Amino acid sequence: MEAGSHVPVVTIDGPSGSGKGTISREVARHLGWHLLDSGALYRLVALLGSLRGVPPEDVAGHAALARAMDVEFGGNGQGGERIRVDGADVTRDVRSETTGQGASRVAAWPAVRDALLERQRAFARAPGLVADGRDMGTVIFPAADLKIFLTASAEERALRRYKQLKEKGSGANLAALSREIAERDRRDSTRAVAPLAPAPDARIVDSTGMSIVQVVASVLAAGRAQGLWS
Ligand code: C5P
């Protein structure tokens, strides 16, 4: 990047249910920066694949969707999100645990990850970007100004996910969710390409027992200490 055109980037990576999504949204809102929810992109590839009848093992077919899909992230006018892909409103389906599992399968394929690379980097626009995912600090934005790796105990993560799904009116079973999250963690951490892991220069934040307000405050304090904002 040329001198003078530097766009500050904060990356927030971590396992499923660690609260990355909520924390990233709040930090972005506080700073007035853009937000990249990279997990939603993998979710959309999986969801579109199943809606279009792409065979589950068709890597090239999913990579083609990843390149061509027309994604719109917006608000629903009531403080919630609205996600459209190729014109269809998929806000609810994109957040289901089934779609999360599908996302974790397609995300293990390098061709799909490559197809989403530039799309993700294009989110870095002034005045700044908060990027949420698994490989934001390691692969997509290795030169990010502040890298956070957010964790929480497996029990707390399953419970948070459970509450989140219930609030959205989706059915959820805590024991099944715990198993699914453990399976997704295992797949995300052991895959060959861009596995879930903290960047060497990431600040690890264990949010077990912390409130959203406390975690947001700790991220903001870290950026302030680095002179990223006042
Ligand atoms: O964060 P979220 O639950 O929406 O992510 C869904 C799945 O997408 C993850 O389990 C992971 O496999 C994949 N993902 C990824 N890299 C990212 C973000 C998400 O591999 N940067």
Image (cartoon, rainbow, N blue to C red):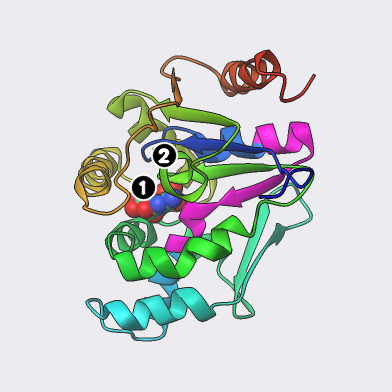
- Which amino acid, by three-letter code, is at mark 2? Arg
Do the CB atoms of the residues marked 1 and 2 lie less than 8 Å apart? yes
Q: Nearer the viewer, residue 93 or 147?
A: 147
Q: Nearer the viewer, mark 1 or mark 2?
A: 2
In the image, is residue 229 part of the stretch drawn in magenta?
A: no
To which quarter of the image does residue 138 belong? top left
- Quadrant occupied by the C terminus: top right
The structure residue drawn at horizontal position 61% and vertical position 17%, both measured from the top left corner, is 222
For the image shown, how many numbered marks are present on the structure? Answer: 2
In the rendered image, the vertical position of residue 217 relative to residue 9, given as above or below: above
- Residue 144 coordinates in the image, percent (x, y): 57, 37
Mark closer to the chain start, 1 or 2? 2
Q: Is residue 50 above or below residue 151?
A: below
Q: Which residue is mark 2?
A: 161
Q: Residue at x 22, y 51 (%)?
A: 191
Amino acid residing under circle 1: Ala
Q: Nearer the viewer, residue 118 or 185?
A: 118
On the image, the x and y values in percent for residue 229 come to 76, 24
Of the numbered discs in the image, which one, if any, rests on residue 24? none
Image check: 213 left or right of 169? right
Q: How many angstroms separate mark 1 from mark 2 (CA)?
A: 9 Å
Residue 172 numbered tag: 1
Task: Give the magenta range.
Answer: 26-42
